[in-house]
Amino acid sequence: MAAGLWDTHTHLQDESFAGDLEEVAARARGRGVERMVLVGVDEGDFARIPAVLARLAGSVAALGIHPLRLCGDDARADPAAAAARLAEAAAEAARRLRPAAIGEIGLDAAAGSEEAQARLFRSQLALARELDVPALFHCRRRFGELVGILRRDGLPRRGAIYHAFSGSREMAEELMALGVRLGLGGALTYGNAARLRALVAGLPLAALVVETDCPDLAPEPHRGERNEPAYLAEIFAALCRLRAGGEDAVAEALARTCEAMFEAAHG
């Protein structure tokens, strides 16, 4: 297994890892996963992540408010006020903790007020530009709106990652044209993902990163288990089977991309 891999999307602050975090990290290192991005999605995560990072040498944080956090009672009562409050909470935490990225941010068809979501997303996108860090995007059935905002507002200088990409060639081309990288996760290993694998086989390697989204979305043969960064090895192997040049060349390309995106936090 090639060394130096980055897992660009984890939720290791999740309580399911509280009892064995060091063992999880050791298993990851044993399979070549040396750096992990801990992705926060709400104010509770902002409080938990610093202590978790202290136990994970070489890892970095991303902080943001997930669009589904606009589904609470306060957001339903006054979506605009909720979006403003959450945006301010994200900004305060990011300026204090100086994360390596802003995310997980975006748009979700299940998250209520479209206007409030767009306001929250745009404010956090601006925060990423201000802090000169990349953004990590979540998008579910709001792709056109998300791309429209990116075209109007622009990306951070260090770019962005579209988390858990499993879309069409047209979507991939739109994102790549904007400078957004595609995050490939467990879906790449699934038996029903032949279309995704065929697409990925023809995409520029420089436009791709790999991720687990642990503890969710475990790859084959671990579906149904708690996902963890060590399982990035299965996702990486699936990608290597689609590319010429061997594991070392793929690993080096992925590492170059991640170093360029996240270097501000660990360089």
Image: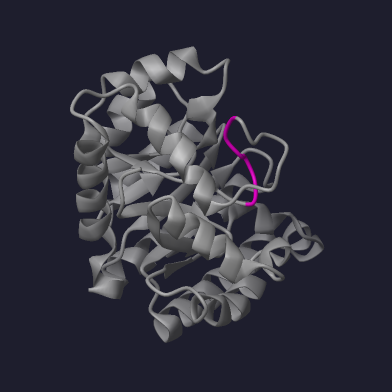
In the image, taking residue 227 as reference, residue 238 lies left or right, namely: left
Foreground pick, 27 / 55: 27
**Quarter holding the N terminus?**
top left
In the image, taking residue 198 as reference, residue 118 lies left or right, namely: right
Residue 216 forms part of the magenta stretch? yes
Residue shown at 52% from the left, 18% from the top: 193
Q: Quadrant of residue 71?
A: bottom right
- How many callouts does the rendering have? 0
The answer to whether any part of residue 157 appears in the image is no
Q: Quadrant of residue 261?
A: bottom left
Q: Position of residue 56 (x, y in %)?
A: 48, 73
Outermost residue to the bottom = 96
The dominant secondary structure in magenta is loop
Foreground pick, 218 / 11: 218
Residue shown at 34% from the left, 45% from the top: 150
Residue 139 forms part of the magenta stretch? no
Q: Quadrant of residue 132?
A: bottom left
Residue shown at 48% from the left, 27% from the top: 188
**Quarter holding the C terminus?**
bottom left
Q: Is residue 29 above or below residue 178?
A: below
Q: Position of residue 235 (x, y in %)?
A: 45, 36
Q: Is residue 250 above or below residue 59?
A: above
Q: Position of residue 219 (x, y in %)?
A: 57, 35
The answer to whether any part of residue 72 appears in the image is yes
Region in magenta? 215-220
Q: Position of residue 196 (x, y in %)?
A: 44, 20
In the image, taking residue 100 as reference, residue 21 lies left or right, namely: right
Coloration of the structure image: one colour
In the image, taking residue 234 as reference, residue 17 lies left or right, namely: right
